[in-house]
Amino acid sequence: MPSTSAIAASLPITGLTLSIGTAGSPDSLSIVANQEEYNQAMKSTVVMVTNVGDQFVRRQPTIVDPGEPTFKVFWIPEEVSHRNSADAGTVTAGLRYLMIKRLLRQVVVNYPSDPNGNAPSDSFEAFVTSFGLTGKVAGVFEAQVTMGISDQAPSFC
């Protein structure tokens, strides 16, 4: 019996987009430009529930922590999705501005479509909690961004 998914053997990252919402009503989403990579690790808080009669340790997952999504962008100082500036109509504030002002925003991660045409997405509210720049000789500027999800009803595909 094969162990490969009936849908596909893999899903290329090409086509992934991360969008951040404006503060307007209705909310408008803007794609973060020049994204290089994306990471998100979910976990549960685990409590030891071992009884005195148990021979082995028991663990019980309690609250789900949706994680702190991190991503890198090839940073351009005046790129509207990167810079330190407020919302401009249907364009969301830049990543630096969102961190400095501690603004909670809607975030949507759109995954590439699979061979069957399914285009799943994650949606949650989050703060930009970290924005770090790196640059070196013979390289380009990169920003490492961390988001803190703060949402009681996130949607994950």
Image (spheres, rainbow, N blue to C red):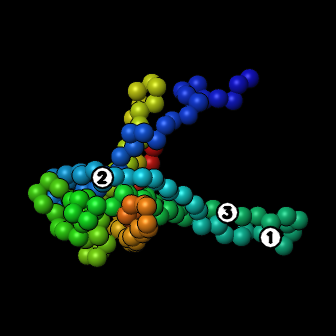
- Which badge, 2 or 1, is on the more N-terminal residue? 2
Residue 88 occupies which quadrant of the picture?
A: bottom left
Residue 121 spot, x, y in % from top left: 39, 43
Label 2: few (<14), some (14–19) or many (≥20) C-alpha neighbours in 10 Å: some
Q: Nearer the viewer, mark 2 or mark 1?
A: 2
Mark nearest the camera among 3 and 2 is: 2
Bin the neighbour count of mark 3 within 10 Å (Cα to Cα): few under 14, some 14-19, many 20 and up: few
As measured in the structure, the alpha-carbon distance from the residue carrying label 2 to the one carrying label 1 is 52 Å
Mark number displayed over residue 104 = none
Q: Position of residue 3 (x, y in %)?
A: 69, 29
Q: Residue furthest left?
A: 89
Above-or-below relation of 117 to 89: above
Mark 1 burial class by Cα count in 10 Å: few <14, some 14-19, many 20+ = few
Helix or strand or loop: what does disc 3 sit on?
strand
Q: Secondary structure at mark 2?
A: loop
Dot 1 falls on a residue whose secondary structure is loop
Residue type for callout 3: Gln
1 vs 3, front mark? 3
Do tag 1 and tag 3 residues touch (Cβ < 8 Å)? no
Query: At 59% from the left edge and 30% from the top edge, which residue is drawn?
Result: 9
Residue drawn at the location 34% of the way across and 52% of the way down: 34
Q: Which residue is mark 2?
A: 33
Q: Which residue is mark 3?
A: 60
Q: Is residue 39 left or right of residue 30?
A: right
Q: Earlier in the sequence, mark 1 or mark 3?
A: 1
Quadrant assignment, res 63:
bottom right
Q: Which of the pair 8/76 is nearer the observer?
A: 76
Kind of residue indicated by mark 1: Asn
